[in-house]
Image (cartoon, rainbow, N blue to C red):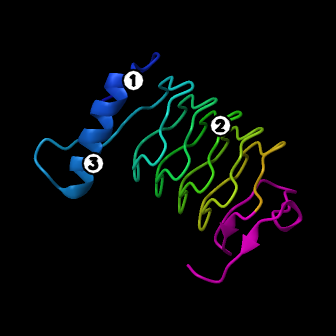
């Protein structure tokens, strides 16, 4: 499913159901491909979008608490002022994403690639990351309250 304009809530729910079937290997499943979609202010609390293609998606002011975005392509995504507490971004591609003013408290950024991402005013207190996590040039996660862990 490829969408380029504002996405209706019912379409999002249908997409989440198809993606769930895809992840479970069930008939009727389809990988979520929302490249460039407008999900402004969507409620995605607890959603499982692991491995989804969300490159360039507008997630401004979204609720993504406890969502699973492991291995998702979020390159160039726009998250400005989203609430992402406890989100799983393990091994996610966040290159050049805008995370300006985002609350990422207690998120999992183990192995995530944030090269070129905008983290201005982002709250990363309690975020876990490892040696494979890639941060923007000059960004110091420890000074912002992130926790380096040894696990891969």
Q: At 56% across and 52% down in the image, what residue appears?
A: 93
- Residue assigned mark 2: 82
- Residue assigned mark 3: 20
Give how far across and how far down residue 20 sits, in percent: 27, 48
Left/right placement of residue 36 relative to residue 82 reads left
Q: Secondary structure at mark 3?
A: helix
Q: Which residues are magenta?
A: 126-152
Q: At 53% across and 55% down in the image, what residue appears?
A: 92
Q: Secondary structure at mark 2?
A: loop
Q: Is residue 122 magenta?
A: no
Task: Give the CA distance from mark 2 to mark 1.
Answer: 17 Å
Query: Overall secondary structure of the magenta stretch?
Result: loop
Circle number at residue 9: 1
**Compared to 14, does 69 lie above or below?**
below
For the N terminus, give its image quadrant. top left
Ranked by sequence position, the earlier of labels 2 and 1 is 1
**Residue 126 appears in which quarter of the rendering?**
bottom right
**Compared to 80, does 96 lie above or below?**
below
For the C terminus, give its image quadrant. bottom right
Ranked by sequence position, the earlier of labels 2 and 3 is 3
In the picture as drawn, the residue positioned furthest to the left comes out as 27
Which of the pair 1/67 is nearer the observer? 67
Q: At 78% across and 50% down in the image, what residue appears?
A: 123
How many discs mark residues in the rendered view? 3
Q: At 27% across and 54% down in the image, what residue appears?
A: 23
Q: Secondary structure at mark 1?
A: helix
Which of the pair 79/44 is nearer the observer? 44
């Amino acid at each position: 499913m490829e969408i380029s304009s504002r996405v209706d809530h019912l379409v999002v729910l249908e997409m989440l159901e198809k993606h769930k079937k895809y992840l479970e290997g069930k008939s009727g499943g389809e990988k979520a491909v929302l490249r460039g979609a407008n999900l402004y202010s969507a409620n995605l609390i607890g959603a499982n979008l692991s491995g989804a293609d969300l490159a360039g998606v507008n997630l401004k002011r979204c609720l993504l608490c406890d969502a699973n975005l492991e291995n998702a392509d979020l390159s160039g995504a726009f998250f400005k002022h989203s609430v992402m507490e406890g989100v799983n971004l393990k091994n996610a591609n966040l290159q050049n994403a805008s995370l300006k003013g985002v609350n990422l408290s207690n998120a999992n950024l183990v192995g995530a690639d944030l090269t070129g991402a905008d983290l201005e005013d982002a709250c990363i207190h309690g975020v876990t990351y490892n040696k494979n996590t890639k941060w923007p040039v000059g960004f110091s996660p420890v000074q912002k309250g992130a926790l380096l862990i040894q696990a891969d």
